[in-house]
Amino acid sequence: MLSLLLVSLFSACSLITDDDEADSESASGSTLVVGDKLPSFEVTMNDGTKITTADLLGHVSLVMLFSVDCPDCRWQLPEVQRLWDMTSRRQLPIVLISRANSANAIAEYWQQAKLTMTYSPQSDYRVYRLFAENIIPRIYISDAGGTIRYISTDVNMPTAEQLIEKTNAIIEEK
């Protein structure tokens, strides 16, 4: 009886999907992989600064897609904050883009977690879908030409030190 209940529960859980994600078409058609170019995007950060893909060219850069409702993101964001605190934005632009979070929800979480990084609040999946179909957090490190050289998702999430190693290795290849 217990095994039947567990099988039923597992089956029900596997049918749960995010309606917005399941019902919407992807802007990019597929998930980006290492070797792809960063997609063309423009976002407005919470401090009013506009960031485009073109702004990232000429620098190794890091783009993180997150949701404050995601437990893995809540683990990864403080690591990216440590990276933020250890680096110069001129040397390593770091762009944080939310996936379907209100500006108020992000600001509340930022205050609670004592984060100081700028972020772009997105109330929908529009920008996110340029990068991927599902799974957060997502970190993309691209080279100065805008080619994605490293991708991290919710598996083996990197520490700030590991992110520095990845970016330094790309910088040193010049």
Image (cartoon, rainbow, N blue to C red):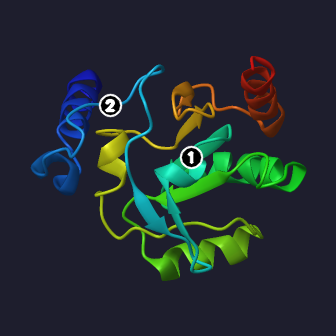
Where does residue 36 sit, x and y in percent of width and height? 41, 25
Secondary structure type for disc 2: loop
Earlier sequence position, callout 2 versus callout 1:
2
List x then y, in percent, for residue 12: 19, 38
Q: Is residue 67 left or right of residue 25?
A: right
- Asked whether, in this view, residue 38 is left or right of residue 63, the answer is left
The 10 Å Cα crowd at callout 2, few under 14, some 14 to 19, many 20 or more, is few
Q: Amino acid at mark 2?
A: Thr
Residue drawn at 65 percent across, 45 percent down: 76
Label 1 Cα crowd, 10 Å radius (few <14 / some 14-19 / many 20+): some
Quarter of the image for the N terminus: give it.
top left
Residue 43: percent from left, percent from top? 45, 65
Q: Residue furthest right?
A: 86
Kindly identify the amino acid type of the residue bearing the numbered disc 1: Val
The residue indicated by pointer 1 is 63
Q: CA distance from mark 2 to mark 1?
A: 15 Å
Residue identified by numbered label 2: 31
Q: Left or right: 30 with respect to 89? A: left
Foreground pick, 8 / 78: 78
Identify the residue shown where x is 58% and y is 74%. 49
Q: Is residue 71 left or right of residue 117?
A: left
